[in-house]
Image: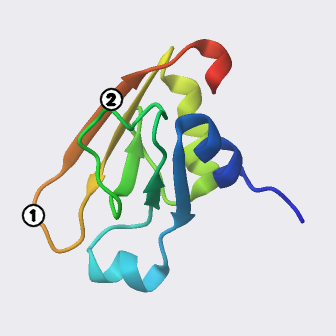
Amino acid sequence: MEVSYIEIIGDRLGLELEELSAEAARKNDVTGGVVVKKIRQGGAFSGTRMEEGFVITSVNGRQIKNSEEFAAALNYGQGRVVLEGIYPNYSGTYTYQVRLNSEEY
């Protein structure tokens, strides 16, 4: 079984992630993104107010449409990860930030 970018990056951030479907992107008026399916206890984002179902549309200030763009955008964080996105059926954009050791991502 092949391991994807999304599994590797998700493991390092303590998040279980999946690609946002084209239908869900249209429904939520976004061009694409990655969905947080689970936040692992003790993971980098477990201490934030992020909730499952959060749709990540930007990583470290760079718009993303899929897991490959998600992985590439992590290179621009310089020890921190800033995720921006939406919650389906809620208005507004939400931002979550954590600081990581360089060996964690």
Q: Quadrant of residue 103?
A: top right
Q: Nearer the viewer, residue 45 or 25?
A: 45
Q: Nearer the viewer, mark 2 or mark 1?
A: 2
Regarding mark 2 in the picture, which secondary structure is present there? strand
Regarding mark 1 in the picture, which secondary structure is present there? loop
The residue at 52%/24% (across/down) is: 76
| Residue 93 in the image, given as x and y percentages of width and height | 18, 51
Quadrant into which the N terminus falls: bottom right
Q: Nearer the viewer, residue 100 or 65?
A: 100
Quadrant into which the C terminus falls: top right
- Identify which amino acid the numbered label 2 is placed on: Gln
| Residue 21 in the image, given as x and y percentages of width and height | 49, 78
Image height check: is 58 above or below 35?
above
Q: Nearer the viewer, residue 100 or 95?
A: 100
- Identify which amino acid the numbered label 1 is placed on: Ser
Image height check: is 49 above or below 55?
above
| Residue 96 in the image, given as x and y percentages of width and height | 29, 36
CA gap, disc 2 and disc 1: 20 Å
Most distant residue in the right direction: 1
The residue at 64%/53% (across/down) is: 6
Count of number-bearing discs: 2
The residue at 39%/53% (across/down) is: 56
Q: Earlier in the sequence, mark 2 or mark 1?
A: 1
Q: Residue 91 — which label?
A: 1
Q: Residue 97 — which label?
A: 2
